[in-house]
Each structure stands twice: as C-alpha cells, then as structure tokens.
Image: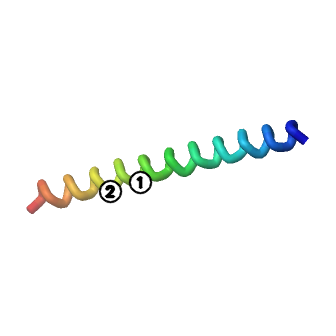
Amino acid sequence: MSCIVFYLASCLKQFAAYINYKESLLNALSKKVFVKGFSNT
C-alpha cells in the first residue's frame, strides 16, 4: 500500500514541476513579447 502512495506522490511532484516549468516558460515568453512590442513603439 505504501508503495502505491509513494508512487502517486512522486507522480504528483513531477506533474507539479512540469506545470511550474511550463508556467515560467510562458511568463518568460510573454515578457519577451511585451518588451519587444514596448521597445518598438
């Protein structure tokens, strides 16, 4: 039983890290676009 719980916990950790990574990537991308558009005007 504890084996399954441990497996699920590690899966959740990986999933959270993946979402965190994607969000930071999107943030960096939108910042780049915003700065580009801002410097163009």
Q: Which amino acid does label 1 sit on?
A: Leu
Identity of the residue drawn at 64% across and 42% down: 13
Q: Quadrant of residue 36?
A: bottom left
Residue 12: x and y, percent?
Answer: 68, 47
Which one is nearer the viewer's eye here, 38 or 19?
A: 19
**How many numbered badges does the structure rendering display?**
2
Identity of the residue drawn at 19% across and 60% down: 37
Which residue position holds label 2? 30
Q: What residue type is labelled 2?
A: Ser
Disc 1 versus disc 2: distance between alpha carbons? Answer: 6 Å
Residue located farthest toward the left when viewing the structure as drawn: 41
Direction from residue 9 to residue 24 in the image, left or right: left
Give the class, few, some or many, for how many residues have Cα within 10 Å of label 1's Cα (few <14, many ≥20): few
Direction from residue 4 to residue 40 in the image, left or right: left
Residue 21: x and y, percent?
Answer: 50, 45
Which residue position holds label 1? 26
Labels 1 and 2 touching (C-beta < 8 A): yes
Residue 24 vertical position relative to residue 30 in the rendered view, above or below: above
Q: How is the image coloured?
A: rainbow
Residue located farthest toward the right when viewing the structure as drawn: 1
Mark 2 lies on a secondary structure that is helix
Q: Quadrant of residue 26?
A: bottom left
Residue 2: x and y, percent?
Answer: 86, 38
Residue located farthest toward the front when viewing the structure as drawn: 2
Mark 1 lies on a secondary structure that is helix
